[in-house]
Image: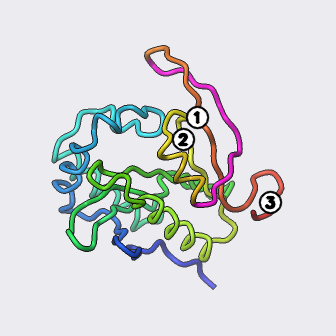
Amino acid sequence: MSEPVFAQVIETPRMWLRCPMPGDGDALYQCVQQTLAQLQTWPDSLPWAQQPQSPDISEDYCQTCYAAWVMGLRWPLLMWDKDMAQLAGSIGFHQINHDTQTWELGYWCSQPYQGQGRMTEAVSVLTVYARKHWPQVRMLCRIDTRNLASLRVAQKTGFSLDKTESLVSESGLSYQVQHHVLGRALHTGQSD
């Protein structure tokens, strides 16, 4: 029996989670611009937000993500609001370690859609889907401890605190990142 491939589209009650496609770059760029200053607050979680942004860079990202999805290397998804047909954010497994069966989940929500439970909805639906198809996988979220909204999403969707690490930014500031996990425990191999 072969493993299922990553879904190109997953439906939530209010959104379509869809793999970035060639041609999505302008919508992604506009969505990022609405929230860029906030995204830049989290350099460990969102290093790409520290780099220059443009419609061409966003389009390159969409094309690269589509190719990575086709090859099964990553599972990036854009969050599209069903009613408005607007981009609401991004979610996905951007690092997949096949040796340890650990998939790192990242997410961000555009400011106009924050505070509505959209990210909790997206994380819940995506992780349920992943656990159904890949029960052996350990899902990991690395979250800056100052990012209270992302910490609440992880807690509401069943992730458990695994560890906290202290880091130093390129500018010399110390900060802490929590590792939250869902699924198989790394050391015991038991599911939660």
* Other-residue count near label 1 (Cα within 10 Å), few / some / many at <14 / 14–19 / ≥20: some
Q: What amino acid is found at the position of numbered circle 2 in the picture?
A: Ile
Residue nearest the viewer, comparing 146 with 7: 146
Residue 89 placement (x, y as % from top left): 33, 55
> Which residue does the image show at 17% across and 41% down from the upper left?
54
Residue 155 placement (x, y as % from top left): 60, 53
Relative to 48, 6 lies left or right: right
What is the residue that sits farthest to the top in this orientation?
172
Task: Report if residue 166 lies within the magenta region.
Answer: yes
Task: Report if residue 148 lies within the magenta region.
Answer: no
Q: What amino acid is found at the position of numbered circle 3 in the picture?
A: Gly
First-in-chain label (3 vs 2): 2
Marks 1/2: CA distance? 5 Å
The quadrant holding residue 137 is bottom right
Residue 170 placement (x, y as % from top left): 45, 19
CB-based contact (under 8 Å), mark 1 and mark 2: yes
Which residue is identified by label 2?
Answer: 143
- Span colored in magenta: 157-170
Q: What amino acid is found at the position of numbered circle 1 in the picture?
A: Val
> Which residue does the image show at 40% across and 64% down from the upper left?
69
> Which secondary structure, mark 1?
strand
Quadrant position of the C terminus in the picture:
bottom right
Marks 3/1: CA distance? 23 Å
Residue 19 placement (x, y as % from top left): 35, 66
Marks 3/2: CA distance? 23 Å
> Which residue does the image show at 22% across and 38% down from the upper left?
53
* Other-residue count near label 2 (Cα within 10 Å), few / some / many at <14 / 14–19 / ≥20: many
Q: Residue 189: which numbered mark, if any? A: 3
Residue nearest the viewer, comparing 176 with 13: 13
Relative to 178, 125 lies left or right: left
Quadrant position of the N terminus in the picture:
bottom right
Which residue is identified by label 1?
Answer: 177
